[in-house]
Image (cartoon, rainbow, N blue to C red):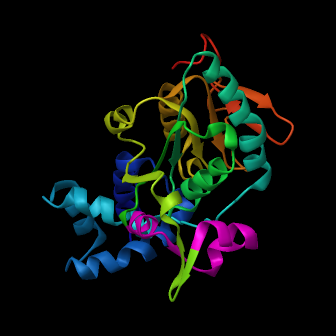
Amino acid sequence: MSEDEFLLIRDCIYGHCGIFFDSDSKYILEKRLSRRLTDLDLHSFFDYYHYLKYNRNKDQELTDIMDVLTTNETYFFRESFQLKAFTDEIIPELIKVKSARNNRSLRIWSAGCSTGEEPYTIAMLLSDIPELKGWNIEIIGTDISQRVLQHARRAVYGKSSFRATEDLQLKLFFNQQDDGYKIKDSIREQVTISHLNLFDTNRMIMLGKMDIIFCRNVIIYFDLAAKKRVVESFYNALHDGGFLLLGHAESLMNITTLFTLRHFKNDLIYQKPKRFALER
């Protein structure tokens, strides 16, 4: 892959989804995409760039290569301190505010849900909160990779997904079968899994307003401009007073001042300012 080919393909991918490859990543991009030249019977990376720009199947190709360009490392009950802030501090606060408005609904979005461990973890945690009994709870998991979404919908997991899962949780929420552990229907039915490109503003708007957005270890793939674009979309998607939960190594510093950083007992969490009372 020449430098010119690298820049053309890199910018094409960036324009599609915001994933950014710097010059040091040229070898990674070349290695991960070289198989596509063979599969499509193309002679050069310039031919591949032309395919991505002009072929009638370009959109499908851009969707398919997300599977080889992104890393989908995740597991159940990841980042325990943040999850404790979620269950012990954020949810009680939302219950109090919403109950005062006679609103018993909760909408949570797992953006970049990968193979589904995160949204299913959210469903498991909420099922243990008696104050939410009878509430209308929606948990939506989205990702740009169709391959990981297929895994999430199947909801069968192996050993690597359970590095932070306790035996009791495994017993309560999973059924063991020959090829791993399958999430019980009572949990799986609470989660909707769908395909979404975070650069697709119109599709994001169609999701509607959220009370909480989890987007952990996703914006690390974006450059500053893409981070600003996606984070502003999250801001617009949240109700006033809603919360944005990022990965432990991620921060909105130098990205935006739209959010307030709340100092909870268990973790630091970003919140959309309460300019008005939390929307119904």
Name of the residue lying farthest toward the left: 56
44 with respect to 134 (left or right): left
Q: Main secondary structure of the magenta part?
A: helix
Give x and y (percent) for residue 28.
50, 71
Give x and y (percent) for residue 154.
42, 70
Name of the residue lying farthest toward the right: 265
Name of the residue lying farthest toward the bottom: 178
Give x and y (percent) for residue 107.
51, 36
Residue 96 in sight here: yes
Which residue is depicted at the point 62% across and 57% down?
121
Query: 224 or 106, which lies in front?
Result: 106
- Label total for image: 0
Which residue is depicted at the point 81% across and 41% down?
267
Query: 28 or 217, which lies in front?
Result: 217
Which residue is depicted at the point 47% across and 52% down?
191
Question: In the rendered view of the protein, which quadrant contains the N terminus?
Answer: bottom left
Residue 50 in sight here: no
Residue 145 among those drawn in magenta: no
Give, as a single range, the part of the protein colored magenta.
Answer: 147-174
Give x and y (percent) for residue 272.
62, 24
Query: 211 or 187, which lies in front?
Result: 187
Which residue is depicted at the point 30% across and 75% down?
36
32 with respect to 231 (left or right): left
